[in-house]
């Protein structure tokens, strides 16, 4: 059961697609004050678990810390981070009382979940203008599925997007891309996509190509496709301020950019220098920006990743002016020498929150200051792209994912979790975040495998890839200036060919389970507690996840490990894909086990009485042979395989899939 409570005058975010009747009175849970801002308070039971918040730091159970829903470009994901790139204001409390809460509010919101007081949940924001949805159900899992239905179907990418992708900030020429493709193909390491970061553009201008390094781009796209490779370019949120640049000229002429209070176009510096931000909350501007993607689709491009769309701001002219003024004042008191105290405090003088108060969106007849709807920018940029691509080819699936998001964007694209680092702890964070994101509708998700910042190691990359085998978005991405991170750069590349190859062998099952989750408003990845709600140990496990309806995954995420401890809520078959191409199988009883998992082995656990299909090795998604599948698991079990052409939006019914039986 879902109940809706309205406070003040909420901004219509379009996060919810299902009509929900507005209730009169107070919710059955917690205390609410709305005189000076909004505040929800609830005293939690000692054993209560709090799920949700999608892309948020720390654990699967969110108790014990404070989180901000405030889309932020923060590159170092250390434990103390309170805000990340996304705002997913959905919680599920499971324990003495089990219920869900969705706070549909597009500005900064604070979730104090046992941080100030260990037993108290407090959710607060500056303005009491929001919709609160309270969801009751039989279990936490049931509540999540109700929320998924309320907010609409999840985005479904083309099937090639389930292949392996290589990315790096620093590929600058056609030859760079050819070397990457040759590096993988010559060593028989599977590959379906190579990503294009900002250097493919002319002077970092959206919807342009560098005429010197990417001349005759359609022919290059065709050349890559002939080798089974899709090129996936980046699109940034900021449009460069430059006379003669058509996108800039059109946007200025038609008033499609966000504006200052005085009506002039807002200026912020990002990668191209001075930029304007498209007003993606304005339907006309959103349509215009979405139509720009056609520039690349007409040249054969079939996928995009949207970036810098919190929106990220390096600085503004107003900020520079304020800093220079403070410097002059400091110099006047120190005989022309820059004071050390001023240098130490310069970072504090630049307040990004103040920049978000400098520009406005045009929504209907109303002008709305950006900070009041800040969390909707990335969502609507990706919505603009999705709607534009649908106009290009209505029945075709395009790959599309974003860095910043809000509830509702899951209908238009997936997300990647941003600028992580080559840290072992980020493998575990990747695993935990996947389940939380699934709860919020984001099924097509993934992290930068191997880590974006810092230097990876061979061991770290192999272990992370062994988790990436199971993430819908499987992309190796790293930053400019880090060590080479392509798989063929390390010794014994056959190990990498094997680990990534397991992804392709499991693709029929992984794709089938993803599609079932998307079409049935279910989860692709979920906590053990959702499947085993009466098992106390399962409620506490955070480093193992259920995938689909047949398997459990438990990656290795510590350096120099030769295995790990696992908890099995029931008897399961322990499967390892070994580097020689064979599959190891062993039945383990319910309980605690130490399992050995050597580097370059890919483990999974099949639930009692279940089985899964496994394909022969392949180097591209297109080469995966769905007609010749091996079944592994328990004899006598059956599996219903979902299949479609992987290209169009004419989806099949999951229950009508091909039934495969294990003899």
Image: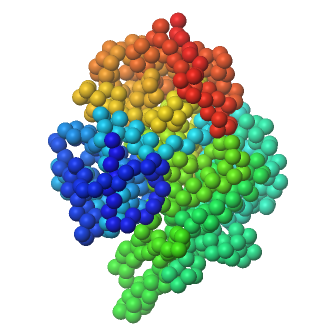
Q: x and y percent of residue 620 in the render?
A: 68, 31
Residue 510: quadrant of the picture:
top right
Residue 200: quadrant of the picture:
bottom right
In this rendered view, identify the residue nearer to me: 567 or 462: 567
In this rendered view, identify the residue nearer to me: 528 or 518: 518
The residue positioned 29% from the left and 29% from the top of the image is 533
Could you tell whether 471 is left or right of 652 in the image? left
Q: x and y percent of residue 344 in the render?
A: 37, 74
Q: Eyeballing the image, is 520 above or below 222?
A: above
Q: Eyeballing the image, is 257 above or below 411?
A: below
The residue positioned 45% from the left and 84% from the top of the image is 322
Q: x and y percent of residue 393 in the render?
A: 72, 47
Q: Is residue 36 visible?
A: yes
The residue positioned 29% from the left and 21% from the top of the image is 592
Could you tell whether 334 is left or right of 210 in the image? left
Quadrant the N terminus occupies? top left
Q: Is residue 234 visible?
A: no
In this rendered view, identify the residue nearer to me: 605 or 393: 393
Q: Eyeballing the image, is 92 above or below 606?
A: below
Q: Eyeballing the image, is 610 above or below 25?
A: above
Q: x and y percent of residue 551 in the render?
A: 44, 24
The residue positioned 59% from the left and 64% from the top of the image is 283
In this rendered view, identify the residue nearer to me: 595 or 395: 395
């Amino acid at each position: 059961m879902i109940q809706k409570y309205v406070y003040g005058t909420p901004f219509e975010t379009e996060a919810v697609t299902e009509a929900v009747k507005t209730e009169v009175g107070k919710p059955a849970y917690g205390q609410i004050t709305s005189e000076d801002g909004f505040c929800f308070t609830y005293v939690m039971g000692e054993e209560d678990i709090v799920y949700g918040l999608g892309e948020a730091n720390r654990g699967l159970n969110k108790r014990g810390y404070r989180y901000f829903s405030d889309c932020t470009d923060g590159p170092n994901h250390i434990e103390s981070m309170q805000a990340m790139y996304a705002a997913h204001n959905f919680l599920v409390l499971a324990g003495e009382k089990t219920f869900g809460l969705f706070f549909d509010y597009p500005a900064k919101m604070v979730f104090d979940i046992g941080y100030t007081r260990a037993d108290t949940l407090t959710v607060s924001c500056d303005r009491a203008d929001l919709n609160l949805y309270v969801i009751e159900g039989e279990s936490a899992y049931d509540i999540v599925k109700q929320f998924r239905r309320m907010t609409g179907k999840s985005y479904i990418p083309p099937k090639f997007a389930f292949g392996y992708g290589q990315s790096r900030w620093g590929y600058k020429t056609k030859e760079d891309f050819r070397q990457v493709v040759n590096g993988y193909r010559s060593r028989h390491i599977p590959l379906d996509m190579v990503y294009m970061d900002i250097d493919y553009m002319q002077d970092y201008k959206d919807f342009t190509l560098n005429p010197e390094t990417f001349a005759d781009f359609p022919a290059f796209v065709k050349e890559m496709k002939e080798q089974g490779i899709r090129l996936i370019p980046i699109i940034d949120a900021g449009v460069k301020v430059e006379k003669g640049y058509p996108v800039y000229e059109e946007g200025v002429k038609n008033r499609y950019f966000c504006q200052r209070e005085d009506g002039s176009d807002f200026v912020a510096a990002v990668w191209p220098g001075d930029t304007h931000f498209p007003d993606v909350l304005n339907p006309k501007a959103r349509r215009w920006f979405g139509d720009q993607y056609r520039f690349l689709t007409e040249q054969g491009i079939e996928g995009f990743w949207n970036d810098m769309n919190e929106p990220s701001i390096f600085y503004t002219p107003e900020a520079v002016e304020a800093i220079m003024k403070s410097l002059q004042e400091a110099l006047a008191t120190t005989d022309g020498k820059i004071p050390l105290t001023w240098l130490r405090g310069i970072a504090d003088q630049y307040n990004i929150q103040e920049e978000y108060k400098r520009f406005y969106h045009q929504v209907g007849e109303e002008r709305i200051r950006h900070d009041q709807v800040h969390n909707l920018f990335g969502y609507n940029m990706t919505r603009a792209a999705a709607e534009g691509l649908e106009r290009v080819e209505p029945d075709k699936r395009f790959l599309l994912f974003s860095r910043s998001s809000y509830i509702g964007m899951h209908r238009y694209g997936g997300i990647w979790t941003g600028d992580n680092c080559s840290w072992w702890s980020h493998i575990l964070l990747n695993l935990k975040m996947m389940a939380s994101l699934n709860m919020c509708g984001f099924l097509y998700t993934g992290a930068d495998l191997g880590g974006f910042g810092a230097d990876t190691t061979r061991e770290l990359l192999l272990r992370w890839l062994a988790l990436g085998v199971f993430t819908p978005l499987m992309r190796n991405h790293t930053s400019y200036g880090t060590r080479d991170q392509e798989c063929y750069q390390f010794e014994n590349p056959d190990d990498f060919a094997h680990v990534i190859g397991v992804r392709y062998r499991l693709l029929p099952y992984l794709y089938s389970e993803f599609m079932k989750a998307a079409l049935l408003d279910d989860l692709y990845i979920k906590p053990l507690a959702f499947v085993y709600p009466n098992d106390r140990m399962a409620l506490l496990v955070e480093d193992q996840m259920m995938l689909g309806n047949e398997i459990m995954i438990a990656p290795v995420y510590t350096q120099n490990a030769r295995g790990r401890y696992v908890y099995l809520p029931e008897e399961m078959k322990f499967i390892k894909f070994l580097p020689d191409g064979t599959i190891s199988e062993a039945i383990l009883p319910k309980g605690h086990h130490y399992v050995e998992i050597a580097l370059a082995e890919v483990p999974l656990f099949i639930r009692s009485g279940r089985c899964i299909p496994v394909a022969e090795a392949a180097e591209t998604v297109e080469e995966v042979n769905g007609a010749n599948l091996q079944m592994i698991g328990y004899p006598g079990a059956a599996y219903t395989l979902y299949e479609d052409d992987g290209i169009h939006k004419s989806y099949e019914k999951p229950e009508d899939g091909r039934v495969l039986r294990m003899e």
